[in-house]
């Protein structure tokens, strides 16, 4: 097995998936099959379409919620992105042509090339280069070259029409100054309120310098602060071959101007759109490696996140995920990524007082020793006594691999799982391989759990092996908080447990599968 530490090359994820699972998938065929299963799900439910017009300026009810609604608008479910396979066999979103056209516009609008050293920057790991970067960047329309070395700065802000490029991860490092405040974003766009566009960051390590905080327990402040790279209200952005090191909050945050908690059915104004992260890596993050909030049309590929510190949270209660698709994000595509030793490898979710992420698609992901490899949930909208989620719809996951989920000190009371689905409707998982440690004590817990109002879920081509001390390979929870409208096809010969009171249940597994009701 490959070593999934911070030196892992995520460009090998596609090859490793095929090698470990033994599957050489015809992606065009598999995606077509998956889409048919997804349409089968959607026929059984109607996603709520809420007009995006008519912002709410209510100050009634709880004061906090009223204040959040000043910067919120009504949410709605978009039509999902259509997945394509290009001539090289890469899965891409149907909107990538639009992003490629805007990349051409970026190149046309860059009118000069400069080297930050010509403006006084010194890559000696000591000199404060903040002013030199500001002079080199100017008002944009420039390619700024950052050569080898370690460049100290108190923050860098990027205007529109900018290409910031180093000599490569581990070769060019931009590091936060020892006197930078805890809330500092190392690299971000210039204007979070009016927004920016056409920003490209490439070939750099971003070191948030968490060591400057000493033994301080909590490493982040609030909102989208305290991260290595934050795009807030950015339209058309690229991040390629960039490393995030020990941020107080996130390595990479694709965000709105402000996080917004106006309630389910609302989303923040000022989200980012049409952003592509490729070959990015990160470790030591206080919360999540990559996160998205209130942003649309996000493409994350060939990336790897591992070993969070969890220090943005109370010790032992750290929801630190490799990749988190969070509050009200829409049309997010993850392709050939990996995660290791996080709380969640990939979490698709929302907080109780925000809309859930919708239309999220995962094609190829390797999770190694994550506690909950894949975790799909809308917090506070799970139980029968909770309000039903208005926004937790539409997840497609294809060609996933889980290797030995384990207990973690990050979240001390959380039991290991290969996948958990709660509250979401219209979920299709196709070609899912889970490999446990035969000697590891999973304490009789299930490997895959469908629970708490999960609806219209289809599992197809599921292989579970070596979880000798676990419970059911798949457990569909019953009772008043049960999952409903569940279909399980082509499951490997492992135990499947079905709870009481479940409606509209279909199971067509291999002959040797053991099913318990």
Image (cartoon, rainbow, N blue to C red):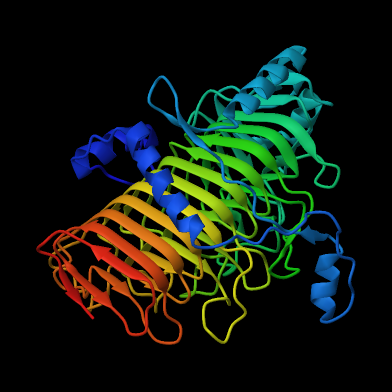
Vertical comparison of 405 with 8: above or below: below
Quarter of the image where the N terminus is located: top left
Provide residue 482's location: percent of width, then percent of height. Answer: 42, 80
Quarter of the image where the C terminus is located: bottom left
**Left or right of 416 in this view: 40:** right
Work out whether residue 455 can be spotted.
yes
Work out whether residue 308 can be spotted.
no
Provide residue 365's location: percent of width, then percent of height. Answer: 37, 46
Q: Residue at x 53, y 23 (%)?
A: 167
Provide residue 494's location: percent of width, then percent of height. Answer: 16, 66
**Furthest residue to the left?**
512
10, 487: nearer the viewer: 487
Provide residue 35's location: percent of width, then percent of height. Answer: 43, 44
Q: Residue at x 65, y 36 (%)?
A: 274
**Left or right of 118 in this view: 147:** left
379, 286: nearer the viewer: 379
Q: Residue 435 falls in which quadrant of the image?
A: bottom left
81, 250: nearer the viewer: 81
**Left or right of 85 in this view: 460:** left
């Amino acid at each position: 097995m490959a070593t999934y530490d911070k030196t892992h090359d995520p460009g090998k994820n596609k090859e490793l998936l095929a090698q470990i699972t033994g599957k050489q998938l015809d992606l065009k065929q598999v995606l077509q099959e998956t889409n048919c299963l997804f349409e089968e799900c959607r026929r059984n439910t109607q996603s709520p379409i809420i007009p995006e017009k008519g912002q709410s300026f209510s100050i009634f009810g709880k004061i906090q919620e009223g204040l959040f609604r000043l910067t919120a608008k009504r949410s709605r479910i978009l039509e999902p992105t259509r997945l394509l396979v290009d001539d090289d066999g890469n899965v891409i979103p149907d909107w990538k042509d639009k992003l490629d056209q805007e990349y051409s516009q970026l190149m046309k609008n860059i009118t000069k090339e400069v080297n930050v050293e010509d403006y006084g920057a010194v890559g000696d790991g000591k000199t404060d280069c903040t002013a030199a970067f500001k002079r080199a960047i100017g008002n944009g329309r420039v390619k700024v070259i950052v050569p080898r070395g370690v460049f100290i700065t108190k923050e860098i802000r990027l205007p529109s029409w900018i290409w910031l490029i180093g000599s490569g991860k581990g070769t060019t490092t931009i590091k936060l100054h020892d006197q930078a405040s805890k809330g500092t974003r190392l690299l971000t766009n210039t204007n979070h309120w009016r927004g920016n566009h056409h920003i490209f960051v490439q070939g750099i390590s971003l070191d948030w310098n968490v060591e400057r905080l000493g033994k301080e327990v909590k490493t982040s402040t609030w909102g989208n602060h305290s991260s290595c790279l934050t795009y807030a209200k950015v339209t058309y952005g690229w991040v390629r071959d960039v490393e995030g090191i020990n941020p107080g909050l996130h390595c990479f945050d694709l965000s709105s101007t402000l996080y917004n908690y106006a309630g389910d059915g609302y989303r923040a104004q000022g989200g980012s759109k049409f952003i592509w992260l490729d070959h990015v890596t990160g470790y030591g993050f206080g919360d999540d490696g990559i996160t998205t909030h209130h942003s649309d049309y996000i493409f994350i590929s060939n990336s790897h996140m591992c070993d969070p510190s969890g220090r943005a949270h109370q010790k032992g209660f750290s929801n630190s995920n490799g990749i988190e698709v969070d509050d009200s994000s829409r049309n997010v595509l993850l392709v050939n990524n990996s995660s290791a030793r996080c709380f969640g490898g990939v979490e698709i979710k929302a907080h109780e007082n925000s809309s859930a992420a919708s239309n999220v698609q995962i094609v190829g992901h390797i999770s190694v020793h994550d506690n909950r490899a894949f975790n799909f949930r809308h917090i506070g909208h799970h139980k029968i006594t909770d309000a039903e989620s208005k926004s937790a719809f539409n997840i497609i996951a294809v060609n996933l691999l889980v290797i030995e989920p384990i207990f973690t000190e990050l979240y001390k009371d959380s039991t290991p799982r290969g996948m958990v689905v709660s509250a979401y409707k219209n979920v299709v998982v196709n070609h899912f391989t889970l490999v446990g440690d035969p000697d590891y004590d999973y304490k009789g817990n299930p490997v895959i759990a469908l629970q708490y109002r999960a609806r219209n879920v289809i599992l197809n081509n599921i292989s579970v092996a070596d979880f000798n001390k676990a419970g059911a390979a798949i457990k569909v929870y019953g009772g008043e908080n049960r999952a409903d409208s569940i279909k399980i096809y082509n499951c490997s010969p492992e135990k499947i447990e079905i709870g009481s009171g479940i409606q509209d249940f279909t199971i067509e597994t291999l002959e040797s599968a053991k099913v318990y009701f």
